[in-house]
Image (cartoon, rainbow, N blue to C red):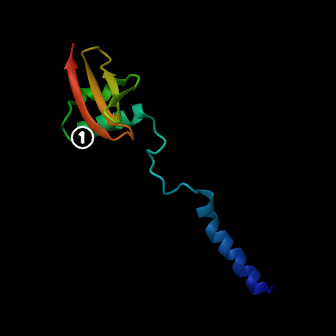
Amino acid sequence: MSFAHAALAAALLALSAPALAHPDHDAAPSANRSIAEKAQDAVLVQIAMSKLDARWRTAVPGKPEARATGTATTWAVPFRQPQGSGTLIVMLSEAGEFISATAAKR
């Protein structure tokens, strides 16, 4: 192998190293997020769209509960206000996509 070929091979290897170092760089950032984290994100989006009151921003998510509905599974994630003034139930698909949110006062 000549010096030019060796230099070209080294240059190509150096340029491709960053791509090889991060094999999942194209993966969605929410791919490894838990259902509770995805529900929290959905609450923040609904607040930003003015579909939920801003007081839900500080609500703490509870334990997600899987619910079988026909052939599909959905997730129900309860959120409770720190001062205990109500409960918000966020429904997500099995993949973690937002379906609905329902608020209830105690």
Whole-percent x, y for residue 84 in the image: 28, 14
Residue nearest the observer in this picture, 56 or 100:
100
Mark 1 packing: few (<14 Cα in 10 Å), some, or many (20+)? few
- Of all residues shown, which one is farthest toward the front? 71
All told, the count of numbered labels is: 1
Q: Is 49 on the left-hand or right-hand side of 1?
A: left
- Residue 68: name its quadrant: top left
Residue 78: give x, y in percent of width and height.
Answer: 33, 23
Residue found at x 37% / y 39%: 96
Horizontal arrangement in the rendering, residue 88 relative to residue 19 (left or right):
left
Give residue 76's quadrant in the image: top left
Q: Nearer the viewer, residue 8 or 89?
A: 89
Q: Quadrant of residue 42?
A: top left
Residue farthest right in this picture:
1
Q: Residue at x 43, y 44 (%)?
A: 30
Name the image quarter holding the N terminus. Answer: bottom right
Residue 44: image x %, image y %?
30, 37
What residue is drawn where x is 21% and y is 12%?
A: 106
Tell me: 16 left or right of 54: right
Residue for badge 1: 48
Compared across the picture, whether 34 is left or right of 97 comes to right
Vertical side of 92 occupied by 84: above or below: above
Give the x, y percent position of residue 82.
32, 17
| Secondary structure state at the residue bearing disc 1 | helix
Which amino acid does the dot numbered 1 rest on? Ala
In the image, is residue 8 above or below residue 106?
A: below
- Compared to 98, does 106 lie above or below? above
